[in-house]
Image (spheres, rainbow, N blue to C red):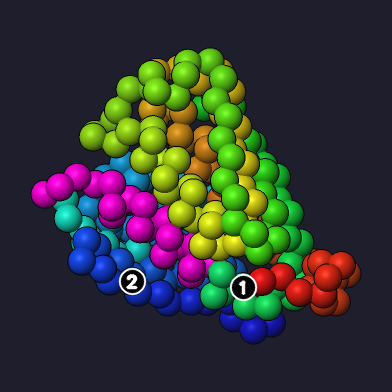
Amino acid sequence: MKKRTAAVTRRTRETDISVKLNIDGSGKSMIRTGIGFLDHMLELFAFWGFFDLEIRARGDFKVDIHHTNEDIGIVLGQAFKKALGDKKGIRRIGYAGAPMEEVVAKAILDINGRGFFGLKVSGVPAGRIMPSEGYRFEYAQHFFDGLAKHLGMNLNIRIEDAGKDLHAALEPAFKALGLALDLATQIDPRRKGVPSTKGVID
């Protein structure tokens, strides 16, 4: 099978981000975003998705972490899209869940070429989940949105029984996303072409 790898670099006046990705890896990662909380979440994502992932980022942290956080999602989405190529043979749809104490997170996704991100949180309202190390819940929303739209993925995340602890709310979400994306990107030997009745996925 052809190696499904990609290297993407994106430079703007606000950020300088490079991503190296091997979809068919072993879960090894080297994440240096300058945002400690996000580094940890992405390490979990790569580990549970069996993606080899290297991310290096510099950003305008003198302003805040918003631009860097969002742009990392954009570049990671571009890397997955590039590595998947024409998407022949992939399962395309993935679903997974993961718990952390009473919190349960689920990720349901479809690599259909149409980027969409939806999120529902039960328990404590998302706006009341307390920041951790300067990282806020809304930053994760921006990251997921950028990832989904630039990969061309319909991504829905559900977080049930969330409390005010950001780590407990987001760790299972990133794990579930890794598990679901691993499933969706796997090659199904029964699928001989592009997994779409249209015959193409943009």
Instruction: Give the vertical position of 185 relative to 82 (above or below).
Output: above
Which residue is depicted at the point 83% across and 70% down? 198
Query: Residue 180's x, y, as percent?
Result: 64, 49
- Helix, strand, or loop for circle 1? helix
Q: Earlier in the sequence, mark 1 or mark 2?
A: 2
Amino acid type at circle 2 is Arg
Quarter where residue 24 is shown: bottom right
Which residue is depicted at the point 36% across and 52% down? 70
- Helix, strand, or loop for circle 2? strand
Residue under pointer 2: 10
Residue 78 covered by magenta stretch: yes
Residue farthest left in this picture: 62
Instruction: Give the vertical position of 50 relative to 168 (above or below).
Output: below
Q: Is residue 165 visible?
A: no
Amino acid type at circle 1 is Leu
Label placed on residue 164: none
Marks 1, 2: nearer the viewer:
2
| The one of 156 and 202 positioned closer to us in this rendering | 202
Residue under pointer 1: 84
Q: Is residue 173 left or right of residue 194?
A: left
Quarter where residue 72 is shown: bottom left
Q: Which residues are magenta?
A: 62-80
Query: Residue 107's x, y, as percent?
Result: 62, 41
Quarter where residue 183 is shown: bottom right
Q: Is residue 112 left or right of residue 20?
A: right
Counting other residues with Cα less than 10 Å from the Cα at mark 1, is it few (<14), some (14-19), or many (20 or more)?
some
